[in-house]
Image (cartoon, coloured by chain):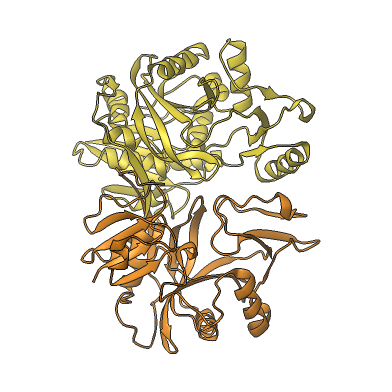
Chain colours: A yellow, B orange
Amino acid sequence: MTNVLVLSATASAINYQKALAGRADLRLFLTDASPLASGLYGDNVVPLLLPRARDLAPYRAALERVIERHKIDVLIPTSDHDMEGVMELLHQGWAPPVAQFRPDYAVYRTLTHKARLMEAMCRAGLRAPAVYDRPDAVRYPAVVKPAREGGSKGVWIVHNRQELEERLAAVRNSYKGDVVLQQYIPGETGTIFVALLLYGQDGTLYGEVASHSHLTFLTWGGGGNAGTVVDEPGLLEQARTIVDRLGGWAGPVNLEFKRHAETGEFYLLEVNCRLNGYSYLYTMNGLNFPAAVVDLLRDGHTTFLRAADQPRRNFVIGFREQPVGEWVREAA
Amino acid sequence: MHIALLGAEKQAAVSAALAWPELPFLFVTDQPVVDGWDLPNVTFSHGVPGRLPDAARAATQCLALCARWATPNLPAPANALGAFDLLTVLGQLRHQFGDVVLPVTATPPPGSTAVVKGNRWHRPDAPVVGAGLDATEIPDPGQAGVVFQEHWPAARHLLATGRRTGRGQVDLAVFHVRAESCARDDVLAAAETVCHDRLGELSVAILDHLDHRGFATLNWLERDGAVRLTSYRPTPRAVFRTLRQAGLDLFGPTAGVRVARPGLRFTVDIHYSSYQRLPA
């Protein structure tokens, strides 16, 4: 029996839970800082509450207790906050006795900061949306967004200086850290594409797939909540090149692109250093990335995952009322 | 019994179909991509508000899940005002019930922080809250009409939802909303029923005053023992399974005033299924 600790119990973690259901050789532990996270109430899951990943000292102490008490073999962070917490702990020298991906810290810091990412892309000669270093330099329409948030949080499209100033103030009020002013890439719903790449610890590629949104969570865009697997070899090559030129990766990494409505060229918008909330689409199409992640960490190898030919299944996400008994109270 | 759910793009559609797996449901929507294709008791039809497909007209009941679909040719929802928009209804309720109701205005209240709301139905996307808002610059992505409401910081968000068929004939539950997310739909992510006599009594009094018939949802805020009504919509929310668990049969006859017992909790299963595209 392999004990797998999945950090966070929302979208991406739920994909692990669903994709690994029926694996008699695995025992899944899902954690979250909130007792309301729906993955804590999934079937065949041991639910645990953890401190928030940004509260690093208590988070580390709780992780160490869980790893020891439950004899955890494999550790998988699945939210941006947990990924950040684990990366910071590893950078500080944390060395828990578990199998986990240990990507390069400097590469991680570049990939997860939207302004640094675009600057690094430009330095590497890669196509990227322009980043404006001051409001005076902005060409409209433009995008205002926090540098280190995912899932369309705090993203606004602005059309003039007054709107820019208002949104800048609002984003600075609501989110810590840097704010990015970026070129707007024109395109409606349906122009967002995601490339998922899975690397082993040695940088070898073990899987790749591209997908395309049919519906976004928000009326103006943002993350996708319906879509399908697509054949976009050029996009996958572009994604591999970006990762290679920026220093390589270990583990799953998602690159979100927008296809320019006029030129048809793909522009990288952001990178998530984990499987995303979308990834169950791939499992539905026979590409079980969560299982591949566990196999890589536990056994050091897995079968290369690549989309087969038609027929393919599309997907839509539903948020379905699920009665529960008590809220989870089990603190780690 | 065969029930047509109008506006099946709303979260409540699947909630109803899961709550009554023995009943056949027709999901009617004008959206191309909706959830529920894997449910054996659900069929789909394209339709638009006011122009229902034949299959819906043949249903035993037609239930609007969004006020956009609550057209006058349906027997319910209905009320004595003949209107469901917040400007009309909250204005009337403020006159009758006083400070417990937070009215809305067509222009931002000067000098105070305001919340932007949809006048006729829920406004999609992230909430917009701010001081000095300019009504001419607020987009209206759902074509609901834009109105403004004083921002009233609260400790708890409560939801009174259920159905009234006549005076003294009400099925109701009061939920403490623990988590929700605002996207195209206002998605309830976690909630639990609570015992809140005052809110239950006020909600019934408001529905009686309006002579509301059909499903209804009242949004309330609470702080330091005070409550404020912020919204009235003539539709159900995605709590059918919980209400059935409470013994409330919302598709059967009403039997006096019945209030769901406290302590019933739900979260959401983030569910993935394949779909067939409908006409836009």
Residue B53 sits above or below residue A190 on the image = below
Pick the front one: B136 or B207: B136
In-image side of A240 versus B135 (left or right): left
Quadrant where the N terminus of chain A is found in the figure = top left
Image position of A253 (left or right of A291): right
At x 54%, y 62%, the residue is B121
- Is residue A321 in sight in this rendering? no
In the image, what residue occupies the spot 36% across and 60% down? B13
Residue B240 position, x and y percent, is: 35, 67
Query: Residue sitting at 55 percent across and 50 percent down?
Result: B125
**Residue A165 visible in the displayed image:** yes
Between B125 and A302, the residue placed more toward the observer is: B125
Q: Position of residue A223 (x, y in %)?
A: 48, 39
* Residue at left offset 23%, top offset 66%: B23
* x and y, in percent, of residue B38 in the image: 25, 50
Q: Quadrant of residue B235?
A: bottom left
Total residue callouts = 0
Task: Look at the picture and state if B250 lies above or below B152.
Answer: below
Looking at the image, which is closer to me, B22 or A11?
Answer: B22
Tell me where residue A70 sits by quadrant.
top left
**Position above or below: B154 against A329:** below
Question: On screen, A270 above or below B141?
Answer: above
Please name whichever residue, B47 or A105, is drawn nearer the observer in this view of the structure.
B47
Residue A218 position in % (x across, y down): 52, 45
